[in-house]
Every structure is written in structure tokens, then in C-alpha cells.
Image (cartoon, helix red, strand yellow):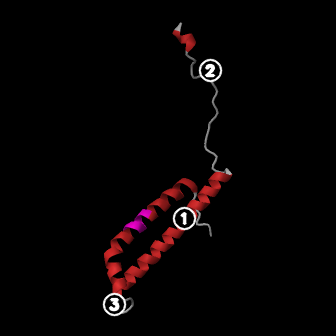
Amino acid sequence: MLNHLIPSRYDVDVPPIGPNFSAPFFAGLQLIASYLLGAALIVVFMMLIIAGAALAFRGLAPERVRTWAGENIVWIFIAAAVLGAASGLFQWFVNFKFGF
């Protein structure tokens, strides 16, 4: 009696269902996220160059910039690693575009 109440898996025909990433909302979201990640990567890369140059060459920057670079170079490396990882995951999930 109980077998008649529960349908078997052969009774229902379910088509394969997947997300539609070509929808306008997803395309706009991907573009905005890629702009933000690209801009953040460029800013962190520029900070890394400035901090490295300030620490490498004494006459290039004033003492205040060298002090800032010495205190924050590790945090800049961490930010670059985190942004690089986030960009890689984003690229892996939804075809990364810088927006250029």
C-alpha cells in the first residue's frame, strides 16, 4: 500500500537545470565586480612599488614615506595576496574581465 503513495524516480521527467549567467543582471554584476577587483589590484600594485622603492633607495622618498613603507609593507603584501586570490577565484567562477 505504501509503494503506491510514493512515486518512483522513473515517474517524473526533470530536465537538467542550470543558472543563466547571460542574464543582464549577472552581466552587469560581473562587470562591476571586475572593475572593482581590477582597480584594487592596480592600486595595491602601485602601493607595493612605491613602498619597495622607498625602502630600497634612501634619497627617493622623505623619511615619513620610508617609515610608512617600513610599517606597512607586510600589510601591502597581504592585501596583494588576498586580492590576487579573490581575482583568481572570480576568474575561475565567471570568466574574469578587467573591463578595458
Say above or below: 65 vs 33. Answer: below
Instruction: Give the labeled residue for mark 3.
Output: 58
Q: Which residue is rendered at x = 56% and y = 12% of the image?
A: 5
Query: Dot 3: what SS?
Result: loop
Check disc 3 and give the amino acid type.
Arg
Instruction: Give the labeled residue for mark 2.
Output: 11
Dividing the picture into quarters, in which one does residue 31 lie?
bottom right
Majority secondary structure of the magenta segment?
helix
Say above or below: 11 vs 82. Answer: above
Inter-mark Cα distance, 2 to 3:
77 Å
Query: Dot 2: what SS?
Result: loop
Q: Which residue is rendered at x = 37% and y = 83% of the image?
A: 65
Instruction: Give the labeled residue for mark 1.
Output: 36
The boundaries of the magenta stretch are: 78-82
Check disc 2 and give the amino acid type.
Asp
Instruction: Mark 3 or mark 1: name the one nearer the start of the chain.
Output: 1
Dividing the picture into quarters, in which one does residue 17 lie?
top right
Query: Dot 1: what SS?
Result: helix
Check disc 1 and give the amino acid type.
Leu
Inter-mark Cα distance, 1 to 2:
48 Å
Instruction: Mark 1 or mark 2: name the one nearer the start of the chain.
Output: 2
The percent coordinates of residue 27 (x first, y second) are 64, 55
**Quarter of the rendering occupied by the C terminus:** bottom right
Camera-nearest residue between 52 and 61:
61
Q: Is residue 21 magenta?
A: no
